[in-house]
Amino acid sequence: MMANVIDQDQQWLLNCLSATLDPNQELRSFAEASLHQASRQPGFGTALSKVAANRELPLGLRQLAAVLLKQFIKKHWEEGDDSFEHPAVSSDEKAVIRRLLLFSLDDSHKKICTAISMAVASIAVYDWPENWPDLLPFMLKLISDQTNMNGVQGALRCLALLSGDLDDKMVPALVPVLFPCLLTIVSSHQVYDKYIRAKATSIVYSCASVLGAMGGVYKTESTALIGPMLKPWMDQFSIILEEPVQAEDPDDWSLRMEVLKCLNQFAQTFPSLTESQFMVIVGPLWKTFESSLRVYVRSSIEGTEDSYEGRYDSDGAEKSLDSFVIQMFEFLLTIVGSAKLVKVVANSVNEVVYHTIAFLQMTEQQVHTWSVDANQFVADEDDVTYSCRVSGSLLLEEIVNTCGGEGIDAIMDAAKKRFNESHQQKAAGSTVWWRIREATLFALASVSEQLVELQVLEMTRIDVGNLLEQIITEDIGIGVHECPFLYARIFTSIAKFTSVISHGVLEQLLNAAIRAIGMDVPPPVKVGACRALSQLLPEANKETIRPQMMGLFSSLVDLLNQASDETLHLVLETLQAAIRADNESSASMEPIISPVILNVWALHVSDPFISIDALDVLEALKNSSGCIHPLVSRVLPYIGPILDKPQQQPDGLIAGSLDLMTMLLKDSPSDVVKAIYDVCFGAVVRIVLQSDDHSEMQNATECLAAFVSGGRQEMITWGGDSGFTMRSLLDAASRLLDPELESSGSLFVGTYILQLILHLSSEMSQHIRNLVAALVRRMQSVQIVGLRSSLLLIFARLVHMSSPNVEQFIDLLVSIPAEGYDNSFAYVMSEWTKQQGEIQGAYQIKVTTSALALLLSTRHVELAKINVQHHLIKTAPGITTRSRAKFAPDQWTVVPLPAKMLALLADVLVEIQEQDLADDDEADSDWEEVQTEDIETDKDLLDSLCTTSSCRPTYGHLEAIEKVFNKDQDDDYEDDQLRVVDPLNQINLALYLGDFFVNFCQHDRQLFEKLCQNLTQSERDAIQMVLNR
């Protein structure tokens, strides 16, 4: 009653609240400022609570007061909280607020009840149970009072919000008293409606989720807690699922969805307990699955009933049919993925797959949206969107992964049945017969990898290729306007099965796709045709397709002019495939294609995805016979002025232009490199020297590296002034190695310097001392690990270049000071030995590892003077928190440098041998031999590096595992540049290390045995294996 008394202060608050809703902005701002000032006065929280609780006041004001109260609680309730602001609410005021809120939970207005519940839940996070012991008894009393349904709803709404913030201390105390009350509600369908029962079930799910999180540490306790309660809940869930799913009844869907969420959580958290009770819900679950399909077909697929798509209840929960069906698939996914539960449904896999394919049919909403919006069609196809189609396809994948051949047979049986059904529908005159056939193709495509693999191995009794050929042959002749989405699905799906479909049918499909690109057909068909062409063109017979290629290029260019951002990527990808499939036609089309692609690139230069796609198309053109010279001639007049005036260009254009230049320089003949040099070299150098934009500097550095790689020694004479080019290159190196420059700006300096010392070794030799000093200074200021690794790679390459006089290089490093260390050698080796295990890339690992072996082979006196980090010392048990790390930093054992170097070399040998053992039994092992093509050799390089790779029978297994260091080499342009030109890439690291350990042991056995004392047992075993050859 006291909430209804309005005094002077209360009236002022009501006036302020009303003013915040006034259309006059000045009045609103003044009222908001007044409320903010009032929030710092004692009693403000109580005043808001009274307004929220006063049922005689307007609904809008009460709801606003409740929202402000929640914000007030967050800021002023708990000192020490991250969001706390002074002053704190007094204990007396807190008690009044808590009491007022509890007595308002049975408000008849759902929005008020929700706002009040949120405020209660906010307080409970701080006060319950210690400072608010009567909260739970009050809630339990309220939800048990069948005469006050508003109170039941309010308490459940509050508990639902509160359960989201429960921790592993609260739940064990709450579950024993709360679950029986909730079970009473869920089981009393004659008393409580479905909305209330769903809300009660959602609380069970929240508590079960917390118990699931506890399972790892308190598995026994959580199992003992939930075990006795599981059976009555499973029985009740079976009763709910037993009834057929109702059409146009979102409360029914919501209740079932919450039941499925609980079952899913139980299955994941307590699989052993759930297995013993699982049979009781198998039959009812199947009835829900079957009946939901009938409702889904009418509501979503046919659109004759309301599916409540995109609608939410008063608590913000989605109430659509789709959300329920997706949750059902998620539970089925858990069942199939569980070794314990899948056995229970193993006999029903055929029926599950058969029904799942029907769920994959396009909905009426999708048909409408995709027909008019190709962008949305592409986006939904590319992205794993939240939909029944995606959820159903994931279930099919899991069935195949879990059930193997039986799962494949189930999918193929279901596909044949659905295909025959579509025949019957078509014969009966149905206009939507194509839907189930499209869904069948979608289902088959979702498991295409497994289907193809098993058919190749002849492990499936049904010929998927034959079935697909039957579909193509029958449907490809249908009018494209009659069934555009079926056409689109044929194009996108069949391309995934090329290895099991005859060449004749593939050629028929390819021709149909080429025709579709040039026809006036619905957008989804063109999208499908593009996807098919991207897959089929690379394997197509060039002579067969050549007569159609000119028309295809014209059609794709036209399509490019019409494409929007979503479809642009697809068209560019298709155009790239077409260019690579027919170089001769590409040369004829270059004058038409290049301007369009350059325009696309320029318009989207700041979009990393589209601009890269456009560059890929231009690169494919560049690599086509007869295209590079006209393409470069077309680009340079445009790019030159841009690079000359970088300050006047829009964001992204300079960095993008540098990327374009780098692409044109890559693997180009020297006359092309010279032409680009004449127009752009000076501007690129100036960008490195003057720009503060890190992306521009990075791209300019890569461009200079490409200039050096392409121009080589010839490049020194191009500048007119004989010293201009070398001075420019050294000036750029000096800027990039400036220790004051942010690390990001220098990110690619390592690749650049390596190109200089590989291709301009004689010019660089006179600058080695200054280069080394600059490298040391730069490395000491580096903040990026990858940059430090690239600088260490330069030192490693210099070690090789100094061979056979490696001792002289060590002396050079010793003579150069380094801040905080005795000399640069001590610093470099300290960083090198710390970083070696983190170095990535086949080329990088080969060069740095073999360089360590060369350094150790010198037995230089300076090696023994240096001590470096070895193994991390575990100082205390438990998790290392940030505060603990701050006061107790990591500690390391310290060993002499030679011992650490030997350990690092042994570690590489261990990794190689372990990889060999791991892959020894793999039938599909694709280990490759080292490339043997002729390469240019450097007169300064160690000749022995080439000879130590000679094959020895006792090292056959080591040669086989060279792939450990050669895999994925085509993914990085920088690595590609270095691999092509550097003879060190020919090193077979396994053989090289074997020879090193044998020679070291033979020439200085005493030192070798002494250093081996610091090795782990696995390192010793690895070395012993090669010594015993």
Image (cartoon, grey):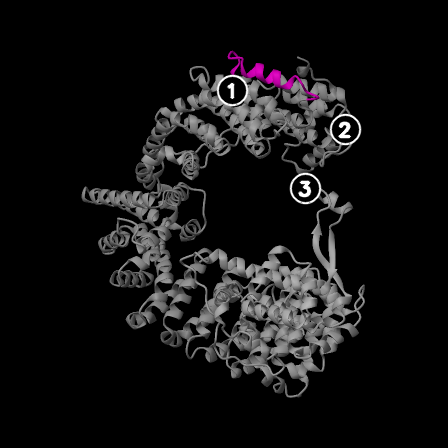
Which stretch is magenta?
130-149
Comes first in the chain, label 2 or label 3: 2
Residue identifier under label 1: 182
User: Image height check: is 43 above or below 29?
Assistant: above
Residue identifier under label 3: 879
Q: Tell me if residue 1011 can be seen.
A: yes
Amino acid marked by disc 2: Ala
Q: Residue at x 51, y 20 (%)?
A: 182
Label 2 and label 3: CA atoms lie apart by 34 Å
- Circle 2 sits in a helix, a strand or a loop, which is it? loop
Q: In this view, does 619 lie to the left or right of 86?
A: left
- Circle 1 sits in a helix, a strand or a loop, which is it? helix
Q: Which residue is drawn at 73% across and 59% down?
A: 895
In the displayed image of the protein, which residue is found farthest to the top? 147
Q: Nearer the viewer, mark 2 or mark 3?
A: 3
Amino acid marked by disc 3: Ile
Amino acid marked by disc 1: Leu
Q: Which residue is drawn at 78% across and 66% down?
A: 865
Q: In this view, does 175 lie to the left or right of 723?
A: left
Q: Quadrant of residue 1028?
A: bottom right
User: How dense is the environment of label 1, judged by Cα within 10 Å: few (below 14), some, or many (20 and up)?
Assistant: many
User: How dense is the environment of label 3, judged by Cα within 10 Å: few (below 14), some, or many (20 and up)?
Assistant: few
- Circle 3 sits in a helix, a strand or a loop, which is it? loop
Comes first in the chain, label 1 or label 3: 1
Residue identifier under label 2: 88
